[in-house]
Amino acid sequence: MNLAPLTPMVVSLGMAALAALGSREHRRVQGDVEIYKLPSVYTYLFFGAFAFFAVVACTPSLTGRNPVTIASFWLFPALAFVGGLYFLRYRLVIDRGGMTVGAFFRRHIDLGQVVDAKLKTGRGAELTLVLEGGSKVRLSGLLTDFDLLSQTLLEHLKSRK
């Protein structure tokens, strides 16, 4: 039985299911704290890539017996796993005093340290915050409810001045 003609339909249905799962999560508000994160569909895609590449790496007929080939086949699942963890753990938390941003090494930024804010809209949207020391923090437009996030941060910054 040849299942190749069904592949586009199965992949399309799978992607639609992942998009539906990812669209249901938005920002959370807990008291005075707002929590934004990346859409979970990216996490599911990376963990799916991890599972696929791990199966490929465990198949001897595909990898052969060469240790270098086996190691390179395990590189892709490792990268996909770390990418999935990054998307799973990334948070941007806004509270009264500032914001905390990051995935593995979170960074707390006092909103009083922000000197300037630049909002880039359209394709590749991002909010760039310039801090007192000259360092910059870029917030991606991929974050859920990015428009609301940028408005909230810009309002916080205007009220501080």
Image (cartoon, rainbow, N blue to C red):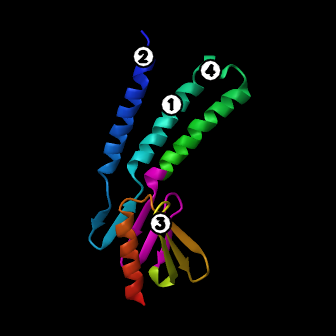
Residue under label 1: 52
- When the figure is inspected, residue 133 is found, relative to residue 41, above or below; the finding is below
Using the rendered view, name the quadrant where residue 67 is placed: top right
The type of residue carrying mark 2 is: Leu
* N-term mark: 2 or 4: 2
- Whether residue 99 is in magenta: the answer is yes
Query: Can you identify the residue that label 3 sits on?
Result: 101
Q: Position of residue 63 (x, y in %)?
A: 65, 23
Q: Earlier in the sequence, mark 4 or mark 3?
A: 4
Whether label 2 touches label 3, CB < 8 Å: no
**Frontmost residue, 1 versus 85:** 1
> In the image, residue 135 lies at what x, y percent?
60, 75
Q: Earlier in the sequence, mark 1 or mark 3?
A: 1
Q: Nearer the viewer, mark 2 or mark 4?
A: 2
Question: Which secondary structure, mark 2?
Answer: loop
Q: Mark 2 sits on what residue? A: 3
Q: Report the amino acid beneath label 1.
A: Phe
Q: Residue at x 43, y 61 (%)?
A: 91
Circle nearer the N terminus (1, 2):
2
Camera-nearest label, 1 or 2: 2
Marks 4, 3: nearer the viewer: 4
Spatial CA distance of label 2 from label 3 is: 45 Å
Cα distance between the residues tagged 4 and 3: 41 Å
